[in-house]
């Protein structure tokens, strides 16, 4: 239900914004700044199935533009309406496949051009640029922003992009199973290369293996492995004092709580490193004058826990199976999951706790 509402709202915002600020709902044969029906089909892909290979920016922008060029060329060269429409769509499909830019609405773009000889006579090949390329680009940009705001990934991450650590290694969940070549061969064998991307297949296989690990871990839950004697801080705790706690206890994370133990967020060691680097850069740029201003600021308003804590972190309850905790920490961005009951922290599960639990389950299974 929520996903359906998210997709529908995205299309509403995307088309509404495009129609309000860029393209007119009524036909403009002078500049070509008007909406066309294929944009509705593009919106379905961009906002409802943003991970589809058919919805990626290259497929959408290049596919629609190439199809428009084909449609205009056929419209100008062929007079018979039926032949013109069929030829435009057929050639558009061939052209977009050759360009590795298959985007289903592109067929409708070519058909729109073939069915609009009067508009094409005014716009000519300008039709491919405006409204088609301009409108598709606008929708792609809006889909990118909307996906980020609603917790989705668009465009999807390619295998050759950096991991969350900024290295050449793929993220842990994507390293599971077959190589990129092996995954590509599976898609080709079952003729699914246009329906499912290699990256998506890798994620599915990784998710399946994580699910298998969940089943193999047995009935253990978060309460069985979590740490209960917690070291916590309030949101007014100074960063220097928090650094001392990290050194003293050798933790990688410290929860931030209210006076009634309500969970507010969590501080990872990386938060301290980032803050220290930011302060160092400020010192380097400003020399002695900046140093004096920084010291004066620190005396009046030092950096506190609440200024650097992470709020949007995975959370669990006491009854969460440990297998469900595994994907929360699989990408390396989080190495501790707070365990909450009615919003108050009762424990914390770290990556070390998970490793120990799975090792124990493996040893027990062999005996």
Image (cartoon, rainbow, N blue to C red):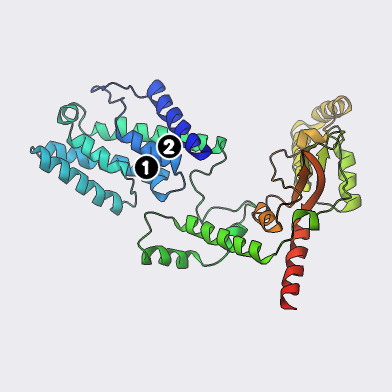
How many residues crowd around disc 2 within 10 Å: few (fewer than 14), some, or many (20 or more)?
many
Measured as percent of width and height from the top left, residue 196 is found at 42, 55
Q: Is residue 325 visible?
A: yes
Provide residue 143's location: percent of width, then percent of height: 46, 36
Give the answer, above or below, for where 355 lies relative to 60: below
Q: Quadrant of residue 104?
A: top left
The quadrant of the image that shows the C terminus is bottom right
Secondary structure beneath dot 2 equals helix
Badge 1 density bin: few <14, some 14–19, many ≥20, Cα 10 Å: many
Residue at 44% over, 44% down? 49
- Tell me where residue 11 appears, x and y as whole percent: 43, 32
* Residue holding disc 1: 60
Q: Is residue 188 left or right of residue 249?
A: left
Asked if one can make out residue 169 in the rendered structure from this viewpoint, the answer is no
Closer to us: 301 or 311: 311
Q: Looking at the image, is mark 2 or mark 1 earlier in the sequence?
A: 1
Q: Position of residue 194 (x, y in %)?
A: 36, 54
For the residues labelled 2 and 1, say whether their Cβ atoms are less than 8 Å apart.
yes
In the displayed structure image, the side of residue 266 where residue 331 appears, left or right? left
Residue 360: which quarter of the image? bottom right
Label for residue 261?
Answer: none
Q: What residue is drawn where x is 68% and y is 39%?
A: 312
Above-or-below relation of 218 to 333:
below
Q: Compared to 225, does 65 lie above or below?
A: above
Q: What residue is disc 2 on?
A: 140
């Amino acid at each position: 239900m929520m996903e359906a509402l998210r997709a529908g709202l995205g299309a509403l915002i995307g088309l509404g914004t495009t129609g309000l600020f860029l393209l007119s709902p009524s036909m403009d044969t002078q500049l070509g700044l008007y909406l066309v029906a294929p944009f509705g089909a593009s919106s379905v892909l961009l906002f409802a199935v943003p991970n589809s290979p058919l919805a990626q920016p290259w497929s959408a922008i290049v596919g629609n533009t190439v199809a428009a060029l084909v449609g205009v060329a056929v419209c100008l060269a062929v007079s018979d309406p039926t032949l013109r429409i069929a030829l435009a769509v057929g050639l558009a499909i061939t052209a977009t496949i050759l360009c590795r830019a298959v985007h289903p609405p592109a067929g409708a773009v070519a058909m729109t051009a073939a069915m609009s000889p009067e508009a094409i006579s005014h716009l000519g090949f300008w039709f491919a640029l405006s409204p088609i390329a301009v409108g598709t680009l606008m929708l792609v940009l809006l889909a990118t922003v909307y996906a980020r705001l609603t917790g989705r990934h668009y465009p999807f991450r390619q295998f050759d992009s950096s991991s969350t650590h900024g290295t050449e290694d793929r993220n842990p969940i994507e390293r599971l199973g077959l190589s990129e070549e092996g995954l590509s061969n599976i898609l080709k064998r079952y003729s699914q290369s246009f329906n499912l991307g290699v990256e998506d297949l890798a994620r599915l296989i990784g998710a399946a293996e994580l699910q298998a690990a969940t089943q193999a871990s047995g009935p253990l839950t978060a309460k069985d492995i979590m740490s209960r004697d917690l070291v916590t801080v309030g949101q007014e705790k100074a960063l220097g004092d928090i650094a001392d706690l990290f050194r003293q206890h050798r933790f990688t994370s410290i929860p931030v709580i209210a006076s009634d133990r309500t969970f507010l967020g969590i501080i990872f060691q990386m938060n301290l490193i980032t803050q220290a680097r930011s302060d160092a850069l400020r010192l380097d740029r400003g020399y002695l004058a900046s140093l004096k201003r920084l010291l004066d600021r620190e005396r009046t308003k030092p950096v506190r826990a609440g200024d650097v804590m992470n709020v949007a972190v995975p959370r669990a309850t006491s009854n969460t199976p440990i297998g469900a905790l595994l994907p929360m920490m699989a990408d390396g961005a989080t190495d501790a999951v707070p365990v909450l009951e009615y919003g108050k922290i009762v424990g914390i599960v770290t990556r070390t706790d998970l490793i120990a639990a799975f090792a124990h389950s493996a040893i027990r299974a062999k005996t």
